Every structure is written in structure tokens, then in C-alpha cells.
Amino acid sequence: MSAEVAIQKFSFPFKCSVHLSPQEKVTQKECVQVKEPKPTESKQNVNLVKLSPARVVGENQTHGSAKPPPGVDKADTQPTICTDESLTAVVLKQNNSLKGEKEDQHLAVQKASVGNAIAAVKKGLMKTDARGQKRDQQNTRLGQRVPPLAAAVGKRRHRKDLFTSPEVFHRLDSQVIRTGVELKENCVYDVKTIVQSITEGARTELERLRSIWVWLCHNIEYDVSGYLGHSEKLSSPEEVIAAGRGVCCSYSNLCTQMCREMDIECQEVPGYSKGVGYRQGQSLREVKSDHLWNAVLLEGQWFLLDACWGAGQVDLDNKSFVKRFDDFYFLTDPEEFIDSHFPDEERWQLLDMPIPLEEFEGRVFKTSSFFTMGLRLIKPHHFHILTDDGEANVSLGFTKPTIFTYEITQHKDLLHCGASELKEASSSSFGLLTVSLRSMKLQLLPPASGLYDVKLFARPETATTPLVWVCSFTVECPVPKTTEDIPVNPHMSWGLQPFAKSLGVLGSSQGGEVIEVDDGVFELTLKTSRPLMMLCELVHPKMEADLVKRCLATQIQPDTLTCHILCPLRGFYRLSVFVRDYEKTDVKVQNAANFLLHCNGTIAGPDELFPPNLGSACGPGTRTSEAGLSKFSHNTAIVCTQQGKCNITFYNQQDLELHYVLSKENNTTAFPHSRYLFCTYTDSKVTLSLSLPEPGVYRLGLYACNTPGGDFSPMCDFVIKSSCNQPRPPFPNVYSAWVKGCVLFEPRAGLLEPLSWVQFRVRVPRAVRVSVVGETLTDLKLNNTRIWEGKAFSGSGSLELKLVASSGDSTDMAVLMTFDVKLVENEK
């Protein structure tokens, strides 16, 4: 807040906070009011009491002033003085309560007179201190109570030592809120009456203080109109209570008065805050302090609280106050309070090692949510970050699973501007956010030179509420880093999501860092705790959807998920993985992980891309296991061959009816692809033989039918990669009579040489006759091993050879398969 705004905010008549009795005579000299003591009062307890800007901040009790904070002698605290910049008046008063008829007295506080006022106060304090010390010695001899010295003679207690959780006050808080509503309905505005009513159910000093705090936060709203100068600020406590609104001094003054009604020692503490109007990086050295809060003495130790910040937030964009009870500012630990509140007097920091104003200015601003979520700042510890080679890094630690996101925008002067909540993750592509088991890392890459604001948002993993603002930084980028376009990540972070384990994902073969892809090929493996279904999304700024489909192959196994990626373009890719429980088909998939891939070298060529229409389940996996297909010879989704041929075997334990499809884009062979696939089914073992006609990438699809005459369902796809340039011959053309138990030993090739004798060896269960029919008829003979064998003449190629068989008493011959014969040269 600027000095001008501070003066406007706090330079208002003292009538709002000081009531003088008719018996008191007051003389005015500049900004200092001095009570003329009677001769008989020279040895009484007469003290100077500090006023915050336009406010009385302290008041004497019957037996002396408030107890000092840790490390401060009582004699030092008898005169309470505001700092040089925030001092506006000093009132000399007696030990009775201040009431009276001079409520309309107005003191014009001039900025030029502040220095004179401070000098006058300091001069008067020297005599007052001496009198106070002498009085304390007399009281000690008379046995009267002397406030203790630093209560922190030992380990300082924290808020958690007073109460384990705000939930312990749930019943008390509810009663106070109900009572507050009743008092308001009955137009009760008297401070004493209100305090007695709201503390009726309180049993301890802590509970009485809690009752006061809760009432303040729920019954007084921040006076935004008064703060902005659009209306007159309310002055007396009764006016503030009746209207239900006030500025920070209204909260602190009411808190002080209410505490004194309950004999709770309470002080108003003036100082600086990083609240509404604060500008990150501004120097506060020549600026008046702009805020007031309270310190209370509980069980011999001082604690801090701010009812103004506990009541809600100011929305400057809409010039309104948003009521939002924030329990964090009730007895806040000094180590956390100092990040947003800096008292004029060093002692009210309540720290063993007080910090200077410059350090307060440079500290990272953290909201209350930062602390309530148990977050920890790892780096940096200064709010202003200068990029190194166009890059800046932020890191937070956490103890419980937490979801993070961030916003990076052009710099604005005010800290409290923009959104304080996000329902969904931001879509910025100027940073890489990764979350590990106990920390979050954000790598920022500003797109151009300039100054940027960075807001971090978070929420507990189990929460369904919006992500809330937790801390802020400014990033100065002199020279941006030359980078390629990074795909937008709408899923909050890179790497495994913090909640991935709850989705069933235990670990990943990759972390959240940028992954350099070699040779245009990448493989990701995720370990799972239970069977999951997986879908993957691959995004490149310049890649079309049809091309994307040919760059992904996924394998889904009961305990492992594997994703094979091809990179046909250079640059950055986003790979997002979505999962759900395998059996819960009616449940939507959820994002479990996101990875940033970078391909800057060799890329995958058009002939290397995966086949079109590849299924979501490649290779053996959960689906094949459930169908009873097991013991696959190849457990991966991708099978490579350098000879252009291979056998894939597995067991069909449930004797399902199976179907196979071999396909390849741009077929240039003379035979259909079905001729390059041959199946042998014996007992429960299935052998799929492949003989590939040309190099390239093929799709082998496996289908099964559970019921006779039913539909075939996809079981899995294999990606077959052949690097053999020598064309392989086709297999024979198989017919439906070729059933389980039939085995072809030779010839395996389905294209025979002409005018040659060809050896046939075949096993046909239950057959009584097996023959080869071409230009001539040749019967095969059954040997001792139950194999039919013999030689047949291929002929000139004008006719194909047919392998036929008959079984039982039937004389009909069924065609098992046919062989093509090459034409002789002169007939071609």
C-alpha cells in the first residue's frame, strides 16, 4: 500500500477509539495529548499508552499494564509507543475505563507533525520509565503481583500445544455463532453485554478468547467502501457492531476491549501486512505501517491473532468483501505469521531471531492454505526469481498427497489480484510441473523477455473442492530460452499423478522430467496393483489425428501397462495415460500420468509407423488371460523378424473357436495376406506360422468366439516388423475341413514348382483316405506314425493341386487345402 493510501486509511479522528471522562483535563500540543496530573497523583500508575495510526492501541489495567512479550522487561513496556511512521497521537490517561462526553473531538493529524510527536513522546518516556521502575520495586515489597518476564524461559509453546485441531471448538463455535445471530436480531450493540453472552459456555481462558475471535470473524465484515474512501469510516465500537463492518483497526480495537471484559491481557500491534493493496517488491522503509492486529497473553506466553484476516478476503476486482472464516489466523505461530505480518516493534515478532524489514519484503508470500496443507518451501526463499538461461525453478515439499497447478501471467502491481481459486488445472505451456512422492517441482520457461507473476495452486488429493492459491512469485526473464512449442498439459502435472496409486498405478519406468527419445521410438511401462484398462493420448502441436493413431500401441496386462510410442516429427510430445478398473466398464477413465517427450534426432519413417486400425489391446494380456489363452511364445506386443518368418504359439485351454487376420497397408503382392498366415491346432496348442512377402509392418489380429455361432471378439493384436528384403512364399489356401489335430509337415509352401514330384506328409485325424488331386490323382499312404505320405506330380501349372480326404464310411472327399503351381516358361 502506498504512503498516500496509508494516510487516507488511518488519518481519521480519534473519537473512533478514545473516550475521555469529564474529569480529565487534556491539553493539546501538536499530535500529543498530555493529561495534567493532580499533585496527589504524582506517584500513581500513570502511563503513556500507544495509539496506532488514529487509534488507541493499549489501555492500563487496575494493577499495572499488560505483561511484556518474551525477552522484554516490564519497565520497557509501561509506555507503549508506536513506530516513527505509524505514530499519530499519544494519550496520557488513568487506570479507569475511558468513557465520556468528548466523543466528537477531532484531531487533525498532519504528516509534518509526526516527527515532532515522536520526539515529544520519547522525551516524556524517560521520566515515565523511571517512575514505572520505582513503582514496580514498591509493589514487589508490598507483595503485589508483578507481571512475569519473558514467559518463553524455556521452549516456546506453539498453537498445537494449546489445542490439537480447530475441531475441538466445534460445539463452542456453533454456540457463539447462534448467539451472535440472536444478539444482532435483538439489536444488542453493547460490548460488555455481547461478551458476557457469547462466553457463557466457555470454561477456560482459551475458550473465552476463542468465543471472542469467532464472534468477530462472523459478525464484522471488512468495510471495503470505507477503505476505498467511498464512504465515511465508522468510528465508535457501537457503530461498528451495529453496522457489522469496519476496517482493521475496528477488529483489533474490538478484540482488545472484549478481551479486557474477560480479564484477558491483549495488545494491539501495528505494523505492515501483505494484504490488500500490497505490491510485491515495494520498499516499506519510507511507508507508514498499514495494519493492526492483536497479541494476547495465555498461560504466561504471548500469542498472535488477526480477526480482520480471519473474517474473509477483499475482492478488489468487484470492490466487495468475501466472507470466509479462516481459522489459521487464530493464535498463529510466529514463524508462520511473520511471512505476512511485520510489526513496527521488533519484539512483537515473538521470534528468537527477529528478521529485518528487508527480509520481510523479500520473503515469498504464502497464504494460510500453504500452512494448513502442510506445504514446505524448498526453493527459492525470495519471491523474486531471475531466470538462468531463460529458466526458473520452484520446488515445494508436502507430507500428504497433494494436487498442484500453476498460473503464469504478465506482471501486475498488486499481489492480491486475479483468481484465488481454480476449479480446473491451468493450460499454460510455459512450464513443466512434476510431482514426486514428497515434492513438487516447477520448471518455468517464460515465452518472452519481461516480468511475470506466478501463482501456485493446490488441494489435498482426496478433496473435490477447487484448487486454492498457496503462494506467489515474480519471475524476471531478461532473455527467453529458445524452445520449441510445448503441448498444453490440461492435467496439472508431469509424471505420475499424486493420486495415481489410488487408481491402481504403483510406479512408472519414467519420471516427470523431459524424456529424450532416441531413434524416434519410446516405450513406457507402468506397474499396477490390480488389473486396469488403459487409454493413451499422444499430442504434438503439428500432428494430425490420423497420424497419431499410427504412433501408439498399448499392451494391457494384469500387473503391467505398456505403451509403445513412435515419433514421426521432431519436437515435444505430450503422452497422457488414462486408466480405470478393468472390470468397471461403466466407470470413466481418469488421468494417471503425463509425460513430456522430446524428439530431436532420428524420427520414425512412414514405413515404420504402426498398422492402421490397431486395437487398444496389443500382445498377450488381461483379455487373453480371461479367455483362457495362455503361455504365449511372444509376451510383447511387437514381434520383430529378420528372416521374414516366425511362429507364435500359445495354448487354447477352453477350446475356443479362433480366427486370425494378417494385414498390411499398401499390399503389393500377388496373393492376399491371408495366404501368408497358417494355423496348426493340436490338442490345446495353437501355432500361428507367418511367412511375410515383403519388409514392413504388419498387424496380426487374434479373435475368439465363446459360443457356437456367436460373434468373434478381439483378443489381441500383434505388431509384426519384418526387415527381410527376400520375399517369402505364401502358405497353401486352407479350407474349413482343415480342423483341430490336422498337421502339414510338407510341403509348407503354397506355390509349387511345375513339372516336379512333390513330397507330401500330413496328419489328418480320423481320415480313411488322403489324396492329392491335380493333373493326376495320387493316394497317400499311412505310415506307422499315423502320417499320410507320398509323392505327387505338380504338372504344368494349368491346374492347382488339391489335398483331399475322406473319413468314416463316406466316399466323399473333402478339400483340406490347395496349392498353386507356377506356370512353365512357354505357357507363361
Image (cartoon, rainbow, N blue to C red):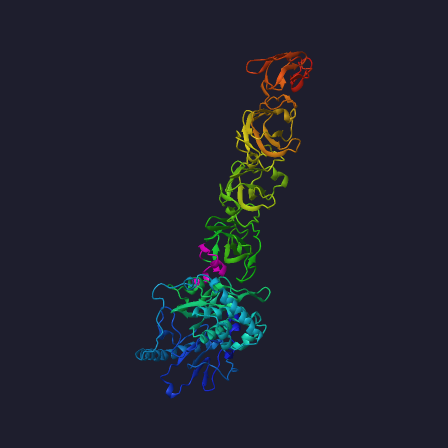
- Number of labels in the image equals 0
For the view shown, which residue lies furthest in the front direction? Answer: 809
The x, y position of residue 698, in whole percent, is: 60, 30
Q: Nearer the viewer, residue 674 or 489?
A: 674
Residue 508, horizontal then vertical, whole percent: 49, 42
The outermost residue toward the bottom is: 39
Q: What is the quadrant of residue 225 in the picture?
A: bottom right
- The residue drawn where x is 41% and y is 81% is 95
User: Magenta segment: does it hold 321?
Assistant: no
Is 660 placed above or below 593 here? above
* Residue farthest left in this picture: 141
Rendering quarter of residue 141: bottom left
Percent of width and height locating residue 381: 44, 57
Nearer to me, 630 or 745: 630
Q: Is 411 on the left or on the right of 44, as rendered?
A: right
Q: Is residue 443 left or right of residue 356?
A: right
* Relative image position of residue 8 (x, y in whole percent): 53, 73
State the image quarter where residue 418 is shown: bottom right
For the residue pair 248 and 630, the one nearer the viewer reads as 630
Relative to 708, residue 479 above or below: below
Residue 813 visible in the picture = yes
The span picked out in magenta is 358-381
- Residue 52 showing in the rendered view: no
Residue 314 in the image: above or below residue 437: below
Q: Name the quadrant of the C terminus.
A: top right
